[in-house]
Amino acid sequence: MTELPCLSPWLTGAAYYLGKYIVFPLYFGKITITGQEHIPQEGALLVTPTHRSRWDALLVPHSVGWLATGRHLYFMVSADEVRGWQGWWIRRLGGFPVERQRPGRQTLTTAVQLLLRGDSLVVFPEGKISRDGTLLPLKPGAVHLALQAVQANPELRLHLLPVYLQYSHPHQPWRTRVQIKIGSPLPVRPPVGQPLRQAVLDGTIRLQTALAALGESLHHLV
């Protein structure tokens, strides 16, 4: 049995309040969040945000995490960062290591097990930060994980949740403004009558289309 991340609810809860009432008000000019009514309250959730900055790892929980849903989020974090004292904190806040270039079997198993347990997992489907704000072609990993989970348990209630983050400046200096738009959840079902590879491709295109539509609906920040 894979050992799952040992998230600390009280440390994570403290981090949410620290961000909401101290860090974000002091640093950002304005944070606008829309679409929180779309967040499913039950079942497993694979949150799939755009990736524009290191701030994303804090702003995604702020918009769809514990204060919004009562549920904590788990993250895949670069293995280089999950070391020593910093690694101890990251693990207690829901992070677990992944080798970005070649994710190991244990990492992927951990992700699937979290979904099967009914947790909320964050995966950035672009695979890297897009500094110019354009939506990059999505990697298939997020959809592949979701389909693996529903294949393991066809009764699992699982959704992909597209989230679009937009900053008023590509390098996010002090007083940057942020828009976060949460889209309608995309239900994930076991593939029927088609190979897994084709189901992954179709699901990735569907997610790409949903994220692109969210981006087009946002007001341009200048």
Image: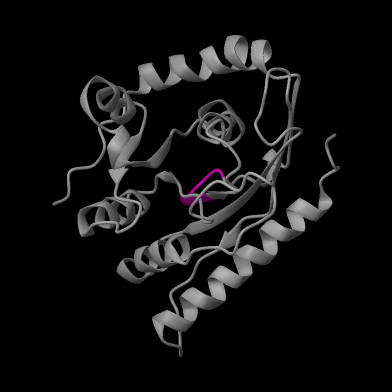
In the rendered structure, the answer to whether residue 108 lies left or right of residue 175 reads: left
Eyeballing the image, is 53 above or below 144? above
Eyeballing the image, is 58 above or below 14? below
Q: Position of residue 24 (x, y in %)?
A: 63, 17
Q: Visible in this render: residue 67?
A: yes
Q: Position of residue 78 (x, y in %)?
A: 34, 42
Between residues 22 and 220, which one lies in front from this camera angle?
A: 220
Does the magenta-highlighted stretch encompass residue 73?
no
Between residues 110 and 104, which one lies in front from this camera angle?
A: 104
Task: Tell me the residue at 81%/55% (across/down).
Answer: 216
Q: Which residue sits furthest left? A: 1
Between residues 215 and 4, which one lies in front from this camera angle?
A: 215
In the rendered structure, the answer to whether residue 31 lies left or right of residue 48 reads: right
Q: Visible in this render: residue 155?
A: no
Which range of residues does the magenta coloring cover? 41-47
Q: Position of residue 149 (x, y in %)?
A: 36, 63
Task: Tell me the residue at 48%/79% (across/down).
Answer: 199
Task: Tell me the residue at 50%/66% (across/down).
Answer: 188
Task: Tell me the residue at 37%/17% (across/down).
Answer: 11
Between residues 44 and 178, which one lies in front from this camera angle?
A: 178
* Protein image colouring: one colour
The C terminus - image quarter = top right
